[in-house]
Amino acid sequence: MTTLGQAENFALQLAQGMSQCLHWFPEDVSPERLAQVLVGMANTQGGSVLLGVAPRSAQVLGVSDIPGLMDCVFQAMLLADPALILPLPEVIHLQEKALLHIQVPAGLPHVYSLQGRYLGRDRTQTNPLPARQLRRLLVERGAIQFESLCPPGASLKDLDEAQIEAYLKLVSWPAHEPAEQVLLRRGCLRQGNGEAGSAQRLQPTFAGLLLFGKQPQRWLPNATLLAARFTGSSFSDRFIKQEIGGTLPQQLQQAEVFLQENIRRVVRMVGMAHQETPEYPFEAVRELLVNAVAHRDYNIQGDNIHLNLFSDRIEVQSPGGLPGPVNLQNLLQARFSRNVVIVQVLADLGYVERLGYGLDRVVSAARQHGLPAPIFEEIAGTFRATLMAATPMMRMPEKVNLAAHPDLNPRQQAALSFLGVRPRITNRDLQELCPDVHAETIRRDLVDMVSRGLLIKVGDKKSTYYILK
């Protein structure tokens, strides 16, 4: 039962009358009128409806026949196509009166119509959805798979035979079956308007071009990944940037190389010994990238996937909100994808598990690495995942000014991390951290850091060691 204070808050919100997520009716509302608002909310961001409130003044009138009004609500839900399945309406007691509260959750799995019309909410009004908005909604909720559409003018000549051959070899497909039939079954090709079974009339889908295309960005210019490493904790003018294009598997391969070159390595105390490890678990960052590439909304053009490395965190942001019934509350348990073809092929290639998002593995890896819990957010039509670094004591000392030296190599970064837990470092110490590197290269790295003003050389010959300046 809702308390008096909660009911008063509802009345206050209604009196403001400015939110598309709130609406109210008197007790005698018809099922048809109620259904319009419920369908409009279901097709947008959800919302709340109160029954028992004056239409214009937001004055609480109350309801007298709760069972009859419940029946009206159920009739309205059944008028939608498909029928709306909503939480049981809640009775709100306010002094001597009662209201009926109907909640329409956000992220319902279908696109709903009423008597053949698709409705949405525009501020406080319920109106027919414009064609562009309806098409986007159908794609977002899986009624239409954008990846399965064919761009005009695309043909089999736009696919890379070498990549297709490598894929077929990897999945051990029977050699006697034509490659076109394999891709047709996978959803990377669709039959055109020609004669049934004619290979000349097969056309690549957006998924096929993204996975096997010679020039995927010809068809989807923003289907790229923009990777950047910044020296501080915010965007600045000093950064290293790489725009990564090509097919989706090629983008993932290049992004992994970027990560390996730019994720700092730190030295942590494990018992009485020092152990060098990446600042972030590589498998967690890789999983965030794969998730972004596999599940982004490719129907949204104008932006690409962003991989941003800061001094205290890594952010991966992709266009499009969470798909279908997935929301921030059920994110780690939900199993729904807007790009089933892309997910399947990436699973065949070993990038992603077919069963789900894998974000639960990101959470587990961060916990095992001693990092804070990842942050997942929906921001202005995008999904952003943030992996935070460890506490400052476990990271590089703040007095090291990396902003002045963004091009330190991994060995030099390891040396500075070592000095975060030890007062000095020697050539031998750095050689043990980087055993595959020649001793002369180690010496030059340390000399270079002295010339940059990061280290001070102390002693001579075999007694030489280095400390932070």
Image (cartoon, grey):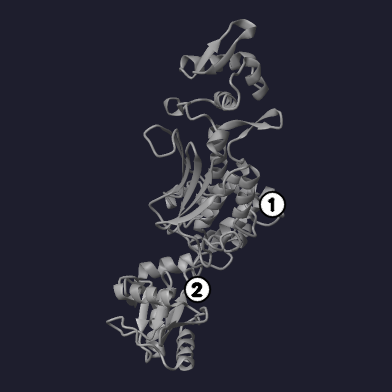
Quarter of image, res 138: bottom left
Inspect this view and state whether residue 154 appears. no
Give SS at disc 1: loop
How many marks overall?
A: 2
Residue 398 lies, with reference to residue 352, above or below; the image says above
Q: Nearer the viewer, residue 170 or 30?
A: 30
* Category of crowding for the residue at label 1, using alpha-carbon neighbours closer than 10 angstroms: few (below 14), some (14–19), many (at least 20): few
The picture places residue 372, in percent across and down from the top left corner, at 57, 46
Q: Residue at x 43, y 68 (%)?
A: 137
Q: Which mark is residue 28?
A: none
Residue 256 lies, with reference to residue 194, above or below; the image says above
Q: Mark 2 near mark 1, Cβ–Cβ under 8 Å?
A: no
Q: Which mark is residue 110?
A: 2
Q: Nearer the viewer, residue 219 or 157?
A: 219
Quarter of image, res 417: top right
The picture places residue 224, in percent across and down from the top left corner, at 46, 46
Q: Nearer the viewer, residue 244 or 247?
A: 244
* Category of crowding for the residue at label 2, using alpha-carbon neighbours closer than 10 angstroms: few (below 14), some (14–19), many (at least 20): many
Camera-side mark, 2 or 1: 2
Q: Which mark is residue 171?
A: 1
Give SS at disc 2: loop
Judged from this view, the residue extending furthest toward the top is: 460
Q: Residue at x 70, y 54 (%)?
A: 173
First along the sequence among labels 2 and 1: 2
Q: CA distance from mark 2 to mark 1?
A: 34 Å
The picture places residue 79, in percent across and down from the top left corner, at 46, 86
Q: Residue at x 60, y 23 (%)?
A: 422
The picture places residue 145, in percent across and down from the top left corner, at 50, 65
The amino acid beneath tag 2 is His
